[in-house]
Image (cartoon, rainbow, N blue to C red):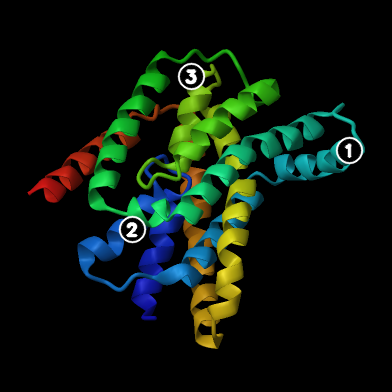
């Protein structure tokens, strides 16, 4: 695969994975709007691995606490913040795994990969994010995350399997509506991405291992490295901006892109 294509795919995935603008929607749009060949599952898995390492590195103290808590959770103890975080992440991941399997087994995941679907989800869920961000209270922090809230955010996260919705966007929307601050809502959304990306990687990875050759593996490694750098930069920038800026700029981008896509789709 040409280096330029790998770079474009990696940059799009890396930048949009953690911003509330839908990485999957942009990756689907890339070949449809440019005429480029679809990057295929090998590259999809590779760039997701790159973004996975980026979020783990950025939130390493929380990830480390969760891993230690996972050990305590395995012994039936939920007596530390790390154990509660691990339990919350497990609970939040269950709905998206179930919904993802249903979509894959029924073939609906491929049926929804269209400009029309992405246009509507960009527009609708962008407006929903704006509503939640403007009306949601800011009374809770990440330390207040409960199993009930984890399950609620998990159900919202499952909706993100519809292209254009944005996994980070919909989970941030849920967090803001539940009363979490912008920074802590985004932090929980990012931490929720770790088991979700791992689950999707396992689902696609089995097929990739059976079909990939040495050239595909090399392309995947290059794409993963580019995606890691782009994701780390985008994540760092967004978390810094949230100290003083709302989610409105992302909403404006989503609405404008959604309108353009719908105009293209219906004309």
- Please name the residue that numbered disc 1 is placed on: 72
Q: Could you say where residue 135 lies in the image, as x and y percent from the top left?
A: 40, 14
Would you identify the image quadrant in which residue 125 lies? Answer: top left
Residue at 41% across, 39% down? 20
214 or 206: nearer the viewer = 206
Would you identify the image quadrant in which residue 255 lies? Answer: top left
170 or 209: nearer the viewer = 209
- Please name the residue that numbered disc 3 is placed on: 177
**Left or right of 229 on screen, residue 258:** left
Residue at 65% across, 50% down? 56
Relative vertical location of residue 37 with respect to residue 19 in this rendering, above or below? below
Would you identify the image quadrant in which residue 140 lies? Answer: top right
Q: Are marks 1 and 2 in contact (CB under 8 Å)?
A: no
Q: Earlier in the sequence, mark 3 or mark 2?
A: 2
Furthest residue toward left = 267
Q: Earlier in the sequence, mark 1 or mark 2?
A: 2
């Amino acid at each position: 695969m040409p280096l330029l294509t790998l770079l474009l795919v990696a940059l799009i995935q890396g930048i949009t994975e953690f911003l509330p603008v839908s990485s999957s929607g942009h990756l689907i749009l890339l070949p449809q709007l440019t005429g480029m060949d679809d990057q295929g599952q090998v590259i999809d898995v590779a760039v997701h691995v790159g973004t996975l390492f980026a979020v783990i590195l950025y939130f390493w103290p929380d990830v480390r606490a969760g891993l230690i808590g996972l050990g305590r959770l395995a012994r039936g103890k939920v007596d530390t913040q790390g154990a509660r975080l691990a339990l919350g992440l497990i609970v939040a991941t269950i709905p998206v795994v179930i919904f993802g399997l249903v979509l894959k087994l029924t073939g609906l995941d491929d049926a929804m990969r269209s400009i029309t679907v992405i246009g509507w989800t960009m527009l609708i869920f962008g407006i929903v994010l704006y509503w939640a961000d403007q009306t949601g209270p800011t009374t809770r922090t990440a330390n207040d995350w409960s199993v009930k809230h984890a399950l609620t955010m998990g159900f919202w996260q499952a909706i993100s399997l519809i292209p254009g919705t944005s996994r980070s966007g919909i989970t941030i929307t849920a967090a803001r509506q539940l009363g979490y601050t912008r920074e802590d809502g985004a932090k929980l959304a990012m931490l929720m991405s770790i088991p979700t990306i791992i689950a999707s990687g396992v689902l696609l990875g089995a097929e990739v291992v059976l079909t990939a050759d040495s050239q595909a593996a090399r392309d995947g490694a290059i794409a993963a490295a580019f995606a890691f750098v782009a994701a780390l930069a985008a994540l760092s920038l967004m978390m810094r901006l949230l100290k003083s800026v709302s989610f409105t700029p992302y909403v404006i981008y989503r609405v404008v892109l959604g309108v353009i896509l719908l105009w293209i789709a219906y004309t």
